[in-house]
Image (tube, rainbow, N blue to C red):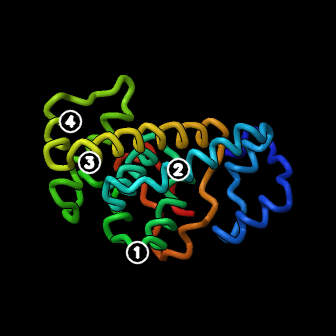
Amino acid sequence: MALRIPKAELPLEVRENMVKQLGAVPENVEVTWHSPKVAQDNLEFGGKVGAWDAADASLKSFAHMAVAALVGCGWCLDVGYFQAQNAKLDLTKASQVPRWRGSEVFTPLERDVLEYAEAMTSTPPTVTDAMYASLLDRLGPPAMVELTTFIAYVNLATRVNVANGVESQGFSDACEIPLAARPGGSGAASTA
């Protein structure tokens, strides 16, 4: 798949900041820059979402990757691995998220968060009272609200990327872990 809309020209300062932060300009920013207000608001809100700290960073990272794998956002998995490495999260676990159901590396809580992320992402959502109550009991209200809102936000981001044709950009190359495909070939893109 190719980008469905050409990249827009970013202001030099924005371009330089992106390169400084990530080593490259994210194509999803270049695509959304056709509407600078949308792009800037999305970057600002994404920054605020990334700064939330009531829920464990690993749980949110794995939830993001689970959403990306289910939706099929190779770019999100790619940058998710890159961010997991920079945050010093468990890269072995990160590499297994797209096939978490068959992997033995996750704790029961992590598995429940991955299941919850997928349940929120399904159309229609398949979140159950029992699933929610179990996580709420273990995480507490602030972390549960944060995790739920975080998963909703990454659903927005992953779906925008997929609809715009944004694919893996190779950010994960620095991690030395491959982008994993979901069992059966559905979902996430193959290696960068």
- Tell me the SS state at disc 4: helix
Which amino acid, mark 2? Lys
Q: Where is mark 2, residue-wise?
A: 48
Measuring from the top left, give residue 3's x and y in whole percent.
72, 44
Cα separation, mark 3 vs mark 2, equals 21 Å
Give the quarter of the image for residue 38. Answer: top right
Which amino acid, mark 3? Val
Q: Counting other residues with Cα less than 10 Å from the Cα at mark 4, is it few (<14), some (14-19), or many (20 or more)?
A: some
Vertical side of 21 occupied by 30: above or below: above
Q: Is residue 192 left or right of residue 24?
A: left
The residue mark sitting in front, 1 or 2, is 2
Q: Are marks 3 and 2 in contact (CB under 8 Å)?
A: no
Cα separation, mark 1 vs mark 4, equals 28 Å
Q: Where is mark 3, residue-wise?
A: 113
Q: Residue at x 83, y 46 (%)?
A: 8
Residue 132: mark: 4
- Tell me the SS state at disc 3: helix
Q: Earlier in the sequence, mark 3 or mark 2?
A: 2
Q: Where is mark 1, residue-wise?
A: 88
Q: Residue at x 38, y 65 (%)?
A: 95
Which amino acid, mark 1? Lys
- Tell me the SS state at disc 1: loop
